[in-house]
Image: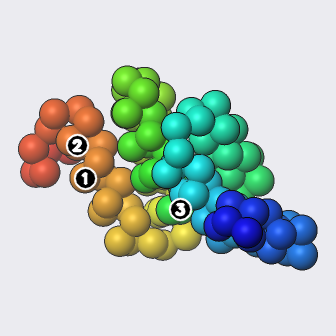
Amino acid sequence: MNRIEQLKEFLKESPQDPFLHYALTMEYMKGDDNVKILESFENMLSRFPDYVGTYYHFGKFLEKLDDHSRAEQIYKDGILIANKVRNHHAKSELMGALSLLLGMDEDDDC
């Protein structure tokens, strides 16, 4: 049984576990099925909007697809969520990713 199949089995037992959905999405990222990856990220945002780790990786995925405007919005949404849940590390990473995307220096304001 491969890792994706294992995670799907775990999800049958714990369908509301955001980490399992996140882990499955990260496994999809190792492949090249962009539709499946996009669906998985969208599922994460709709079902677990406070799961901060999703935003950074979703933004990077969107950058890879050259969807920079959507990546920018995902980073901004993630920054708001990171503030809400008081995850300063994630906020810092998201702000860094947003700054890089926008071509800003680290000292510039978003």
Label 3: element kind: loop
Q: Nearer the viewer, residue 61 or 107?
A: 61
Amino acid at the residue labelled 3: Val
Amino acid at the residue labelled 2: Ser
Residues at discs 1 and 2 in contact (Cβ within 8 Å): yes
Q: Which residue is mark 3?
A: 52
Q: Calculate the distance from the C-alpha at mark 3 to the C-alpha at mark 1.
A: 15 Å
Q: Badge 1: how crowded within 10 Å, few (<14), some, or many (20+)?
A: some
Find residue 39 and report its image quarter.
top right
Q: Calculate the distance from the C-alpha at mark 3 to the C-alpha at mark 2.
A: 18 Å
Q: Quick check: 12 above or below 33?
A: below
Q: Badge 2: how crowded within 10 Å, few (<14), some, or many (20+)?
A: some
The residue at 38%/62% (across/down) is 91
Q: Position of residue 89 (x, y in %)?
A: 35, 71
Question: Residue 56, which numbered label?
Answer: none
Label 2: element kind: helix
The residue at 30%/43% (across/down) is 98
Q: Calculate the distance from the C-alpha at mark 1 to the C-alpha at mark 2.
A: 5 Å
Amino acid at the residue labelled 1: Gly
Q: Quick check: 4 above or below 102?
A: below
Question: Residue 99, which numbered label?
Answer: 2
